[in-house]
Image (spheres, rainbow, N blue to C red):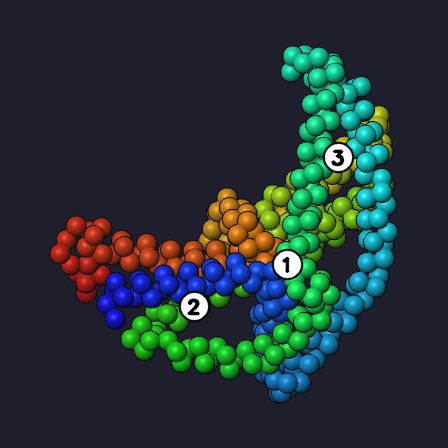
Amino acid sequence: MNLRGQMKFWLISLALFIGFMMVFSEVMLPFVAGMALAYLLDPVCDWLEAKSMGRLTATLTILFVFLIVLILFFLMILPVLGSQLASFLDSLPELVKKLQQLVSSNFGERLLSMSGLSGESLQASMGELITQGASWMGGLAQSLWSGGQALLSILSLFLITPVVAFYLLLDWDNMVAKIDGWLPRQHLDTLRGLASEMDRAVAGFVRGQVSVCVLLGLFYAIGLAVVGLNFGLLIGLGAGLVSFIPFVGAGLGFMVSLGVALVQFWPDWTMIIGVGIVFAIGQFLEGNVLQPRLVGKSTGLHPVILMFALFAFGYLFGFVGMLIAVPASAMIGVLARFALKQYLASPLYTGTGRSKATQEE
């Protein structure tokens, strides 16, 4: 197959994949979660196999331990989170009203002088802004719910995902060997090298970022609870979990915490500043300790590119798109760097009749 035929084949394959994802995105969540779980746990299964444990026994052991830990976590944390979430949703209208009154009464004159609006206009503008913000957050929650609900409701995530993970984890090595057998023999070494680089990029980011999100969530939750912030556990864990989107988790968590702190502690600036210190320390730990040690530069992508990928994939495929955004971007980045390397070694770049690589030989 010539170059034009190869390009046509891969473009058609890409179009079919995108079409498949767009059509079935609402039912893909349990399967994508199962694939991610199998991918994360495969190294542990390989380690147990190296300790003379059979693949089936290792798979059952890993999934059993994982489910026990998950169940214990939900039994200990979920009731508290559910109670805080219900209280937060019940008190949200009153919190927004008090926050609006507090800002108007204490910062109204300064805002009036800066904006040039009348008091009524400023209050109406603030009310409209807060209403729009609440509407946006409600729309986001509804989008995440509808995208994650799947065909048989959210319960399918907990019923189907372990089954999918079990079968994939059991046959992981066989599937990798089967796919390797489909690769064109002429470019086998190149394709294996690209696949290994993609695996390192995806594994390094996903496994590292999961650890970062968990540690940040625990830190924010404990820190906000120590400060005495209402709904601190809920806000802290939420900010940590959303940290898989660069800057969004900490920013959203800080804004919500600041609003709650202003209503709860005003005019005691000490406690309000304490909330800010918790997030400042969290950002310092994330940028200088957790990210460099646990994630590093495994994807080779700029944070702005990662943010764009998350929003673009989320817009196209919903919540499932956000789950696959970073792995897909990391793989695309590997292919882009390989294409750039080929271009820099080609006559198109060197301006000669032969490629740079051929000349060096």
* Dot 3 or dot 1, earlier in sequence: 1
- Picture coordinates of residue 40 (x, y %)? 60, 68
* Dot 2 or dot 3, earlier in sequence: 2
Say which residue label 2 marks.
195
- Picture coordinates of residue 203 (x, y %)? 54, 64
Q: Is residue 108 above or below residue 88?
A: above
- Picture coordinates of residue 327 (x, y %)? 52, 59
What is the crowding at mark 1: few (fewer than 14 residues within 10 Å), some, or many (at least 20)? some
Disc ID at residue 210: 1
Q: How far apart, in angstroms, are the residues tagged by discs 2 and 3?
A: 45 Å
Residue extending furthest toward the left:
353
- Picture coordinates of residue 131 (x, y %)? 72, 32
The residue nearer to you, when weighing 282 against 249, is: 249
Question: Measuring 40% from the left and 65% from the top, which residue is drawn there?
Answer: 13
Say which residue label 3 marks.
258
Q: Amino acid at mark 1?
A: Val
Q: How far apart, in angstroms, are the residues tagged by discs 2 and 1?
A: 22 Å
The residue nearer to you, when weighing 294 against 139, is: 139
Quarter of the rendering occupied by the C terminus? bottom left
Q: Amino acid at mark 3?
A: Leu
Q: Is residue 120 above or below residue 346?
A: above
On the image, which quarter does residue 63 sit in? Answer: bottom right
Q: Is residue 130 above or below residue 196?
A: above
The residue nearer to you, when weighing 12 against 313, is: 12
Residue 42 shows in the view:
yes
> Mark 3–mark 1 contact, CB under 8 Å?
no
Quarter of the rendering occupied by the N terminus? bottom left
